[in-house]
Image (spheres, rainbow, N blue to C red):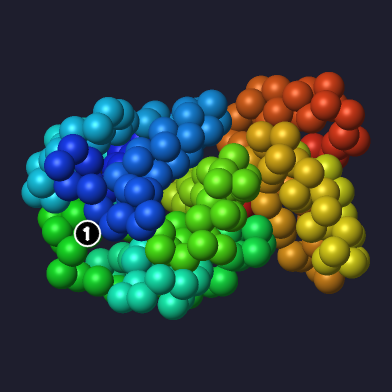
Amino acid sequence: MAYKVIVDAGHGGADLGATYQGRQEKDDNLRLALAVGEILSQNGVDVEYTRTTDVYQTPFEKAQLANASGADFFISFHRNSSPMPNQYSGTEVLVYDKSGQKLDMAENINGALGELGFRDLGVEARPGLVVLRRTKMPALLIETGFLNTDADNKQFDTQFQEIAQAIASGILGTLDEEHLNQEPEDHSIYYRVQTGSFRDRSNADRMLYELLDRGFPAFLLHQDGLYKVQVGAFRVLENAVKMEQSLRRAGYSTFLDAAPPSY
């Protein structure tokens, strides 16, 4: 199943969002939204944007655009702000309520950002937010660090591509899981491209970070006491073979595993 995601860069135009020492939230939001959307597109996700330039839209307009798109998920990019500079630090994801695929995706995104060193502030239910309440599909709002915290800004700037990849990997991993869960109970086969299997988590993390740095949508599975580094999960063998070939060209040893959905 091909998924469609609508990517929203929060604020825009005359709505600057949070500001700090000349920095404007609307600009960070747009930059990150476009970067994550590009990675998702490169991995077969149909991506639409609420905005790709510096324009203003009301939250209701954003929700209407999302609903008209027929997307499967709505993901809005923001940055947090505290009453005092350098008061708080970390990332969190807001959802309408803590249930379903949106919660799984939110936790996966927070976990991926936590692997980069961000403090994980968790997932919070915010049913009063228009873009979460008025959208017809599962919706998330990502707060990627505090705009008025110097440490978070430094990490946002110096690890920008890693942050975009981490968020995209959290999304892609959830879509893979959701796709497998939707398969009929006929024990259909799906294919996993594995690049390593480790008893030591630190060794698995090193390979994971290297793959993410190189643009592969990698994530870890912990099974049978082993940390397995996986790049994708595919229902179509041809797609898995293409990914395996890309990894081998990049110098990785691979193992193509076929297993039923209950694996």
> Identity of the amino acid at label 1?
Leu
The image shows residue 192 at horizontal and vertical percentages of: 71, 42
**What residue is at 83 percent from the left and 26 percent from the top?**
250
Q: Nearer the viewer, residue 32 or 131?
A: 32
Q: Locate the C terminus and report the quarter of the image it occupies.
A: bottom right
The image shows residue 221 at horizontal and vertical percentages of: 71, 59
Where 238 sits versus 83, above or below?
A: above
The image shows residue 37 at horizontal and vertical percentages of: 43, 34
Q: Nearer the viewer, residue 134 or 235?
A: 134
Where 225 sits versus 218, above or below?
A: below
**What residue is at 70 percent from the left and 23 percent from the top?**
242
**What residue is at 59 percent from the left and 36 percent from the top?**
235
Residue highlighted by disc 1? 132
The image shows residue 117 at horizontal and vertical percentages of: 65, 64
Is 138 on the left or on the right of 226, as rendered?
A: left
Q: Quadrant of residue 124?
A: bottom left
**What residue is at 90 percent from the left and 66 percent from the top?**
199
Q: Residues within 10 Å of mark 1 (few under 14, many from 20)?
A: many
Q: Quadrant of residue 1?
A: top left
Q: Secondary structure at mark 1?
A: helix
- The answer to whether one can see residue 138 in this image is no
- The answer to whether one can see residue 217 in this image is yes
Residue with the most extreme front position: 21
Q: Nearer the viewer, residue 21 or 229?
A: 21
Q: How many marks?
A: 1
Is 103 on the left or on the right of 126, as rendered?
A: right
